[in-house]
Image (cartoon, rainbow, N blue to C red):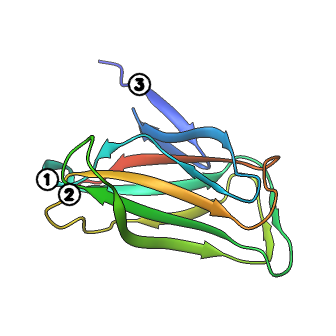
Amino acid sequence: MTLLTQTVGAKQNFAPDYIFNNAALANGGSTTSSAFRLGGALLGAEVVGYADTEITIASAQTIVYALHTSDTYAGSYTLSDTIVTKTAGTIANGAELFRFAGNTGTKLWAKVVCTTTADQSLDKHTVILERVPR
């Protein structure tokens, strides 16, 4: 049997679920992913972000990744956790931006929101849902 694999960043994953796939960062605003199931049976999953280009963050600027959750797919999503805040500096192409195994509590659905304080639209990132054996 042949398993489908994909190399994301420097890591090989088996059939990853893409949250953002080689997507441009925002021009001084936010981008929100589609809803995906994170709670319940998928508690052995992590949300992982990779840089798809070299990302340069200017002085006094930030890139923030946050997890918003809801009880239902079409429900209202509210901030659950700030995953990571990146500040001034350079992130190498292919580098892992973050690895997050958040607890959504009883909430089953999640979205990742990426917010930038400057124009980062030429920079690209990939965020996946990675199954983790427990």
Decide if residue 1 is on the left or right side of residue 85. left
Q: Which of the two labelled residues, at mark 2 and mark 3, occupies the earlier sequence position?
A: 3
How far is mark 1 from mark 2, CA to CA? 6 Å
| Residue at (66% x, 59% y) in the render | 95
| Residue to which mark 3 is pinned | 4
| Residue to which mark 1 is pinned | 40
Comparing marks 1 and 3, which lies closer to the viewer? 1
Give residue 72's position: percent from left, percent from top.
20, 46
Give residue 114's position: percent from left, percent from top.
58, 58
Comparing marks 1 and 2, which lies closer to the viewer? 1
How far is mark 1 from mark 3, CA to CA? 25 Å
Q: Amino acid at mark 1?
A: Gly
Tell me, yes or no, whether the two marked residues, 1 and 2, touch with CB atoms within 8 Å. Answer: yes
Q: Amino acid at mark 3?
A: Leu
State the SS at label 2.
loop
Asked whether 94 or 19 is in front, the reply is: 19
Q: Which of the two labelled residues, at mark 1 and mark 3, occupies the earlier sequence position?
A: 3
Decide if residue 21 is on the left or right side of residue 38. right
State the SS at label 1.
helix
Give residue 50's position: percent from left, percent from top.
60, 53
Decide: few, some or many residues near mark 3? Use Cα within 10 Å; few <14, some 14-19, many ≥20.
few
| Residue at (46% x, 54% y) in the render | 112
